[in-house]
Structures are given as structure tokens and as C-alpha cells.
Amino acid sequence: MSIGGLKSLLAEATIRGVTEARARILGHIFNPTGQRSPHKILHKKLVGEKVAQWYPYDIKKDDPLVMARQQQERLSKLEMLKRRGKGPPKKGQGKRAAKRNK
């Protein structure tokens, strides 16, 4: 082996050692081959909990009184629409069924 080859081999080993040390100190992943790695994705913080905290607690899900009141409002509105003739048609009497029956 010539002196130039030895120098380049020594320089390459030094650079590799410095890169490894830098990765260890800074908490990075040492990847000398440059292969793809999922580390970048796995290293990210999970955001689901933060997103869930952003939205206020919904009382409708747990309180049966609130659910019952909403259902009652819906039924009274539906009854009012039916009295005016604007309610939903009976099954088999809507626009789509009228087109099919022609």
C-alpha cells in the first residue's frame, strides 16, 4: 500500500469517527450507508392527544337528558313539517320511486 492510500484511509476513518461521535452527542442516528430508515417518522411526537385536548368535552355523548331533549325537538319539528305537508314521504312514494313506477 502506498503512502497516499494510507493517508486517504486514515482520513476516511477519522471522518467516520467524527461523524459517529457527532451523531452520539447530538442524539442523531448514524447511517453511513444512507439507506432509507423509518426513524424520522417514528421519532416524531404523536399528535393525537394534543388534538383531542383542543376540542372541549361534549356533554351530549354522556347525558341522556340532553339526548332525549334533542330527540324530542327533532320529533316535534318533524310533526310540524308533516302538518304543513313538507315532511318526508312514505316509503315507496318519493321522487325516485315515482320515476321508477312510470
Image: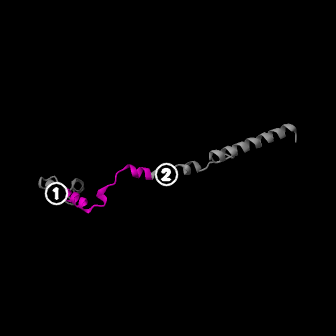
Does residue 17 lie above or below 98 as drawn? above
Q: Check disc 1: other Cα within 10 Å, few if <14, some if 14-19, many if 20+.
A: few
Please name which of the two marks, 2 or 1, marks the residue nearer to the observer: 2
Amino acid on which disc 2 is placed: Leu
Q: Residue at x 34, y 51 (%)?
A: 56
Asked which quadrant contains residue 66, the reply is: bottom left
Q: Residue at x 44, y 53 (%)?
A: 49
| Mark 1, residue position | 76
Helix, strand or loop for disc 2: loop
Q: From which residue to which does the magenta span run?
A: 49-78
- Camera-nearest residue between 38 and 65: 65
Residue 89 seen by the camera? no
Q: Position of residue 7 (x, y in %)?
A: 82, 38
Residue 28 circle label: none
Residue most extreme to the left: 83
Going by the image, does 45 lie left or right of 5? left
Residue most extreme to the right: 2
Is residue 40 found inside the magenta-colored segment of the image? no
Does residue 54 lie above or below 68 as drawn? above
Asked which quadrant contains residue 34, the reply is: top right
Does residue 41 lie above or below 72 as drawn? above
Residue 18 seen by the camera? yes
Q: Check disc 2: other Cα within 10 Å, few if <14, some if 14-19, many if 20+.
A: few
| Mark 2, residue position | 46
Amino acid on which disc 1 is placed: Ser
Going by the image, does 46 lie left or right of 78? right
User: Dividing the image into 4 quarters, which one contains the C terminus?
Assistant: bottom left
Going by the image, does 22 lie left or right of 77? right
Q: Residue at x 84, y 40 (%)?
A: 6
Q: Position of residue 60 (x, y in %)?
A: 29, 57
